[in-house]
Amino acid sequence: MLANENQVALVTGAGTGIGRAIAEKFAALGASVVVTDMNIQAAEETVKLLTNPAGNARHQALAMDVTDKASIAAVMEKVKKDYGHLDILDNNAGVSSMAHIADITEEDWDFNFNVNAKGVFLVTQAALPLMKEKGGRIVNTCSMAAVKPDPTLAHYTASKFAVLGFTKACALEFAQYKINVNCVCPGYVKTSMQDREKVWEAEMRGLTPEQVIEGYIANTPLGRLCYPEDVADVCGFLVSPEAKFLTGEAVNVAGGAQI
């Protein structure tokens, strides 16, 4: 469980996949969870899955575009009005595309950086006033790509290196406010994003999508794909009292695939 049953958590990109699993984990730990996503219907579906073990948690779904300052500000104002504070921020929203460096377009580069890097910055900056007084935890979803780059994901990799660096800088600056900042680096996660990526990679390498997945598993010492719940479990630890003395860390959740 969390340090107290009145904690409020906000998760971005929580309509599906890793974000949904993280929202479920935080709710199971006793937090009131603000589920945000560009797709409000998906966010509402996530809220329907959230448990309420403490009996007093108040979950809600809000539409938010992490690349739009006005959208972010509206959500933070709603959090302030409804809860008065924010204890946990999980910057999970992310995108990907795949191409060799010679074929990456400026639009591809900006798409990855706007969501993956600038989005983390904008949401963190907007959430800070709600977290400074009481302290709290920030967890950013980075990627195995930040520790083991892929030649077909240079733009995505660069955006995730930015998340890793930003995490460490925030850890240094926010320590004075008793805010711990860490990130998780998932490996080959079975999500809708992977469903798209395996098709792209298959086309680029002359393989079938099934062969691509077989390769992911073969490259993972623990012998299976990563699941959203694997990542959520680590995020749950990072916001728990047991992780009170961890900050500035990048935790690999990749079954050894990063080695």
Image (cartoon, rainbow, N blue to C red):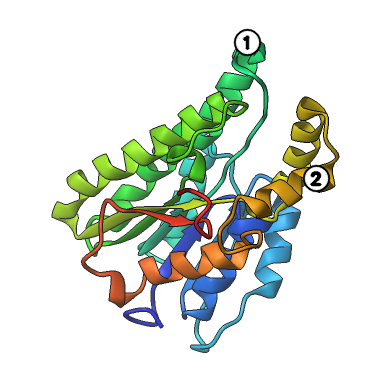
Instruction: Classify 165 as above or below 185.
Output: above
Position in image of residue 121 (x %, y %): 40, 37
Foreground of the two, 108 or 44: 108
Quadrant where the N terminus sits is: bottom left
Identify the residue at image location x=27%, y=43%.
168
Position in image of residue 187 (x %, y %): 56, 51
Q: Residues within 10 Å of mark 2 (few under 14, many from 20)?
A: few
Position in image of residue 198 (x %, y %): 76, 41
Foreground of the two, 8 or 77: 8
Foreground of the two, 191 or 119: 191
Give the number of the mark in front: 1 or 2. Answer: 2
Q: Of callouts 1 and 2, which one flags the residue occurring earlier in the amino acid sequence?
A: 1
Give, as a three-letter code, the residue at label 1.
Ala
Identify the residue at image location x=51%, y=27%.
113
Identify the residue at image location x=59%, y=55%.
220
Please tell me whether mark 1 sits on a helix, a strand or a loop: helix
Residue labelled with disc 1: 102
Identify the residue at image location x=49%, y=56%.
256
Q: In whole angstroms, how far apart are the C-alphas of marks 1 and 2? A: 25 Å
Count of all numbered marks drawn on residues in the image: 2
Give the number of the disc on residue 158: none
Q: Residues within 10 Å of mark 1 (few under 14, many from 20)?
A: few
Do we see residue 157 in this rendering?
yes
Q: Is residue 140 left or right of residue 204?
A: left
Position in image of residue 102 (x %, y %): 62, 10
Residue labelled with disc 2: 211
Give, as a three-letter code, the residue at label 2.
Gln
Please tell me whether mark 2 sits on a helix, a strand or a loop: helix
Instruction: Classify 190 as above or below 240.
Output: above
Do we see residue 58 in this rendering?
no
